[in-house]
Image (tube, grey):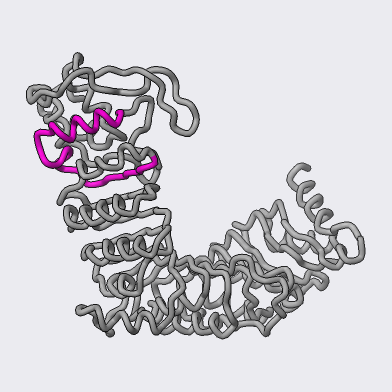
Amino acid sequence: MALTCRAFFGPAMDILWSEIPNLVPLIKCMPPDLWQVSGTWYWGDSRPEDTILSLRRALLVTDWERFSIYAPRVRSFGFTDQLHYNICIADQAVCAEAFRDISLCKPTEQLLPNLRHLGWSDKDQLLAPYVHLFLGPKLHSLNLDLHDEDHTKVSSMLSYASFKCPYLTHVELAYKLDKSNDVQDISKFITGLAHLVKLDIKIPSLSAESIIHLSNLDCLEALLMRVPNLGDADLHAAKHFHPAHDSSVGFPSLQHLNIVTTRLSSILSVCRLMRSTPAKSISFSFETATNDEVRSLIKILHDQCSHSLLETLCVRQKNPSSSTPIAPGISIVPLFAFRNLQSLYVQSISLALNDALVRDLAVSWPELVCLDIAADLNAAAHATLLTLASLQILAGHCPRLVQVQLHVDSRVLPDPLDGFVGEKVAILELRSSPISDADDVAGFLMEVFPNLYSIHASDPLAAVGGLPNRWQRVNDILANRFTN
């Protein structure tokens, strides 16, 4: 298109040069006697021959002419969310010596003056000192994958990035923490950013002060973080050292929240900072929790999140102790206030569910698409509180329902209800669910879910008695329906 009309040349070049993975395309715009491609580059798997781009001679001022024409058109450099590449990727890579010479002879302070997104990895630590070439005031998105164990280097990099890129809106950070100083440096970097829209930090490195800072940002819409063990006292103390803290404001624009931590109590401490938060999706993952803490979480979400906006809620307890005694189930009735909820995922938490409550659930959440309640298999006793009637109720009141995962007692068939049909459900996840008559159950489920073709389930009673799994017979019947 650039060759067909002069008017198209500029826009076409802007598109062609808007995103590049490394400096190879720009260096190849320089005089051909300046650079050469040779050697073998090893990155993970072996690369083919002739993959390292190096400089054959010293750089001259005149060498930058065509480089300077195309460099201002680059908006995205390095890896992106879709392509998690190193700064040296693709078929060819620029050697560290070339970066050194470019750094010494560059015509402008920032190599790519209009850069908006930078994805940088220092897995090749020879290139780590050159990230400053790409940092500037127009940078809005920064994705750092840091591996350098030299604390001083990482600290200097973050400090420089905070100074040179004050208008960052999207930050993603992965780093191997070894020292408490690392936590302080990363938290200081975060607290220096006043325009964050999205923060994705894959290490438990945020201090209480940085979390207070994030809760006061008017523009923060997405927060994905690993939280260290902290409590209400930590956050309360941090408030006194945060001059701009307003206790009446807490995550005022946050739409997507994802927290991974060890203890649910740490999540509660963060959630208590919420004030009328307009969350659309919430995900919590933790290892240890008490029933009282889960109840507190449900209450906080009910009190501090918009009832009309929440669409997805995920609460997962990872690796629960098998020795934990079965406690009374936890009520989810307060969650029925979220009338537009579409997906509920609950893992390894005992909920107080029965057929009557599922009816209230289905009526409260007519937009429900996915209901995934996977109790710990040690809590199989709670599965007997739900029967096949719950599946029929969900099918009738939730026409958009696609995915169901529940423990269900299938030994008693309910009376069929006219019009209670779930046409979009193709697979059922019934996990550990007792069953008696496989043929009757298959007939009932085919009426309720006419497009059902597979069920993933096992019969705990059959396993104890050494009997065959009757759910396999149900699956055979379903398969025959579609093959005949």
Q: For the magenta stretch, what is the residue range? A: 95-123
Is residue 83 among what the camera can see?
A: no
Residue 466 location (% of width, % of height): 92, 61
Is 220 positioned to the left or the right of 441 in the image?
A: left
- Depicted 283 relative to depicted 175: above or below: below
Answer whether residue 38 is visible to the viewer in this image.
Answer: yes
- Quadrant that contains the N terminus: top left
Task: Name above or below for residue 16 compared with residue 277.
Answer: above
Query: Residue 377's x, y, as percent?
Result: 72, 68
| x 39%, y 71%: residue | 309
Spot occupied by residue 33 in the image (x, y as percentages of width and height): 19, 14
User: Residue shown at 51%/75% (left/top)?
Assistant: 264
Relative to the observer, which residue lies in front, 218 or 207?
Answer: 207
Compared across the picture, whether 72 is left or right of 234 comes to left
Residue at figure coordinates x 39%, y 53% from the top left: 174
Could you tell whether 447 is left or right of 109 in the image? right
Q: Is 217 drawn above or below residue 55 in the view shown?
A: below
